[in-house]
Amino acid sequence: MRRRLMPLLSPALIAAMLALLSATAALAQQAGGGVPVTTDTVQQGAVPIEILANGIVASESVVTVRTRVDGQITQVHVTEGQMVRRGQPLFSLDARLNQAILAQQEAQLARDRAQAARTAADAQRYQSLRGESFASQQRFEQAQADALAAAATVRATEALIAQTRLQVEFATITAEIDGRLGALPLRVGNFVRQAESTAITTLTQMDPILVQFAVPERWLPEIRAAVRRSSARVQVRAEQDDAPAPEGELIFVDSAVDTTTGTILLKARFANADAQLWPGQYVQVTLTPRSQEDAMTVATAAVQTGQQGRFVFVLTADSTARRRSVTLERTLGNRAVVRGEIQPGEKVIVDGAQRVTDGTRAVERNAPPNVPATAQRVSAAR
């Protein structure tokens, strides 16, 4: 019979039986036969209230660059994706025609000014002759009218010159804001027309930058109170971004709740000199309107769920596990904010809570061993 049964025992089964015997022996060696557990201390203090949401990064200003004059592109001063400053040249157009018109108008202005000076002198001369009765009233009035017309012609020519100078200035297309350039579909040699409204490129403001997100309307009273106190803090983090989360300022709360989703739209502004946030990027938003004072927290893994609600196991001074009912308010990282039948300083069971019941004796594995001080000194000397 032994020869027939031994081949039926596989190596895996034998290893499992040995592991079970080892675990049984280890439990038997625990002091008092208690279940080994790890604990966490119930803490009480100020805990920030965090509202989590998904957001989208958006630029405060996106400028579409178009030409304001007709002309051929003679020079491109920038490259695609380049950061530019306001007033920096982007493109140069052929302005020779407008420069020629400007020279013609400046010559015409010199002629008009000479004509105005002559008519003004005639008007003054006829005024003196009229006083001596050598000129008629009609001739004097005609001289005054000629002087006024010549002065008006000078102003009209000056206005034309100012307009032509603008046309020459528009031939150099500059950046209207600080930002990052988009794609450049046109190159040197392309002819652009004002009437076509063709976009030459786009400029996107990167610093500062906005993040738009929506939160449930139940948080609206907390948010409005935080805005009045100027205490709202907003942090964002992109997916798989290990850099420190930037902190911004809540600047906008929408004037109405979206009735289709039951949410309120918010916007926050962030400094973005290092371009950590990118327009159109999805980010995780953490809005902190205030801190909750005297909140009790435990490790999240300590909170269990049963048929009668949530509970924790408290390890008492006599190494006994006692079940206490709690209410889970929210979680903050690996901590859970709770209220119920627990007190600050008590120890709740974290690892091993599934292996105990109310009244089970337990041994705290993370507690320091109870060794006399003299023995510790002898061991250190050795």
Image (cartoon, rainbow, N blue to C red):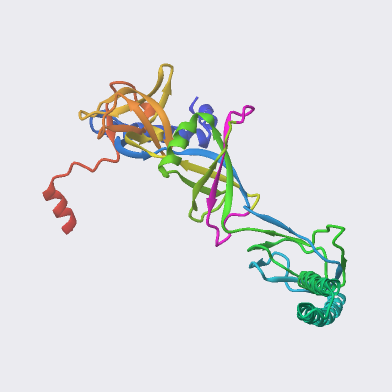
Foreground: 349 or 29?
A: 349
Question: In which quarter of the view is residue 330 placed?
Answer: top left
Specify whether 174 is left or right of 69: left
- Is residue 191 in view from this perspective? yes
Eyeballing the image, is 115 above or below 187?
below
Eyeballing the image, is 238 above or below 86?
above
Q: Quadrant of the C terminus?
A: bottom left
Give the dominant element type of the magenta stretch: helix, strand or loop.
loop
**Residue under the point 43% across and 40% down:** 228
How many numbered discs, if any?
Answer: 0
Eyeballing the image, is 26 above or below 199?
above
Specify whether 54 is left or right of 65: left
Q: Residue furthest front?
A: 133
Magenta span covers which residues?
258-278
Q: Can you give x and y, in whole percent of width and height, for residue 1 in the image?
A: 50, 24
**Residue under the point 55% across and 62% down:** 274
Q: Can you give x and y, in whole percent of width and height, for residue 155 in the image?
A: 78, 71
**Residue under the point 80% across and 63% down:** 68
- Is residue 18 in view from this perspective? no
Q: Can you give x and y, in whole percent of width and height, for residue 267 in the image?
A: 56, 44
Q: Residue furthest top?
A: 308
Let me know if residue 83 is in the magenta part: no
Foreground: 169 or 381?
A: 169
Q: Can you give x and y, in whole percent of width and height, for residue 139 in the image?
A: 86, 74
Specify whether 207 is left or right of 169: left
Let me know if residue 266 is in the magenta part: yes
Foreground: 230 or 340?
A: 230
Q: Residue furthest left?
A: 374
